[in-house]
Image (cartoon, rainbow, N blue to C red):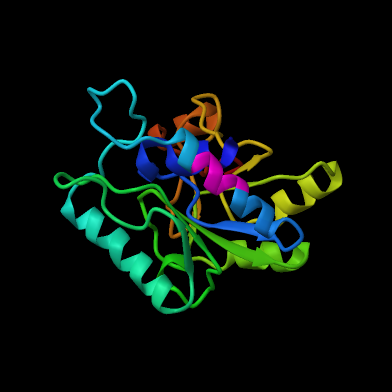
């Protein structure tokens, strides 16, 4: 459920949508199967005027072409499409919710922001490799991970090079929390008490000569 919420809300078109799913090898296939079933059963592409639909169109033709190019590049390099992978309908900018398996770091989708309804699933062996894969990006706005080990929750949160980390949840935005990222995802924060700092001016006063 959290994977669906994080990836497919607004058809994957929010700045904090999950761009990559990095899954431990012991549950890799099971996760892929369950996510695929959930996508097929719960996501319905269509007009916003249709009460049965919960997946709308992409913003424009360029967005559709970008998603298509990323999928083609991934498939050409060995990825498998578990569901979706093409435009939905004969008109408009609708695109099928898509899941890719056997994705590697050499593919475009591993390095570019998708901003569309595509979930590429990567596999990792241990914690160190998983964190390294997550940090292998020039961007650093939001990240998410799941663990029942509280020590690991703190350890991994500190190791992730992201401005916001959701632990055991796929939704993390709140007006009461500082919103912002690291690396190429920007400087500064909005929201929370830290957000007001962007509207303030710091003044430095140096006083001398009082003893003369």
Q: Give residue 29's quadrant in the image.
A: bottom right
Q: Examine the rendering and report whether any part of residue 37 can be seen.
A: yes
Residue at image position (34%, 24%) is: 52
5 lies above or below 155: above
133 lies above or below 91: below
Residue at image position (51%, 36%) is: 5
The outermost residue toward the left is 91
Horizontally, residue 64 falls left or right of residue 173, namely left
Q: Position of residue 85 (x, y in %)?
A: 36, 58
In this view, the residue in front, 90 or 169, is 90
Q: Position of residue 204 (x, y in %)?
A: 48, 42
88 lies above or below 193: below
Count of marks, rendered view: 0
Quadrant of the snapshot with the N terminus: top right
Residue at image position (39%, 44%) is: 12
Magenta-tinted stretch = 34-39
Q: Give residue 199's quadrant in the image.
A: top left
Question: Is residue 136 on the magenta stretch?
Answer: no
Horizontally, residue 1 falls left or right of residue 203, namely right
Quadrant of the snapshot with the C terminus: top right
In this view, the residue in front, 106 or 77, is 77
Predominant SS along the magenta part: helix
Q: Examine the rendering and report whether any part of residue 208 can be seen.
A: no
In this view, the residue in front, 176 or 80, is 80
Q: Position of residue 196 (x, y in %)?
A: 45, 29
Q: Position of residue 165 (x, y in %)?
A: 62, 44
């Amino acid at each position: 459920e959290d994977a669906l919420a994080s990836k497919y809300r607004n058809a994957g078109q929010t700045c904090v949508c999950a761009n990559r799913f990095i899954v431990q090898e012991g549950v890799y296939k099971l996760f892929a199967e369950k996510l695929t079933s959930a996508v097929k059963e719960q996501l319905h592409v269509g007009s916003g005027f249709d009460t049965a639909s919960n997946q709308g169109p992409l913003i424009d033709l360029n967005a559709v072409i970008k998603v298509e190019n990323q999928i083609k590049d991934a498939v050409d390099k060995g990825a498998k499409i578990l569901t979706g992978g093409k435009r939905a309908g004969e008109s408009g900018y609708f695109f099928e919710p898509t899941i890719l398996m056997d994705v590697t770091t050499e593919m475009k989708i591993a390095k570019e922001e998708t901003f569309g309804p595509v979930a590429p699933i990567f596999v990792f062996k241990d914690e160190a490799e998983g964190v390294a894969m997550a940090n292998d990006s020039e961007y650093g706005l939001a990240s998410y991970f799941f663990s029942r080990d509280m020590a690991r929750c703190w350890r991994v949160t500190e190791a992730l090079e992201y401005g916001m980390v959701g632990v055991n949840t796929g939704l993390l935005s709140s007006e009461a929390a500082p919103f912002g990222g690291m690396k190429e995802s920007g400087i500064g924060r909005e929201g929370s008490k830290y957000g007001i700092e962007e509207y303030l001016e710091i003044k430095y006063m140096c006083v001398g000569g009082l003893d003369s």
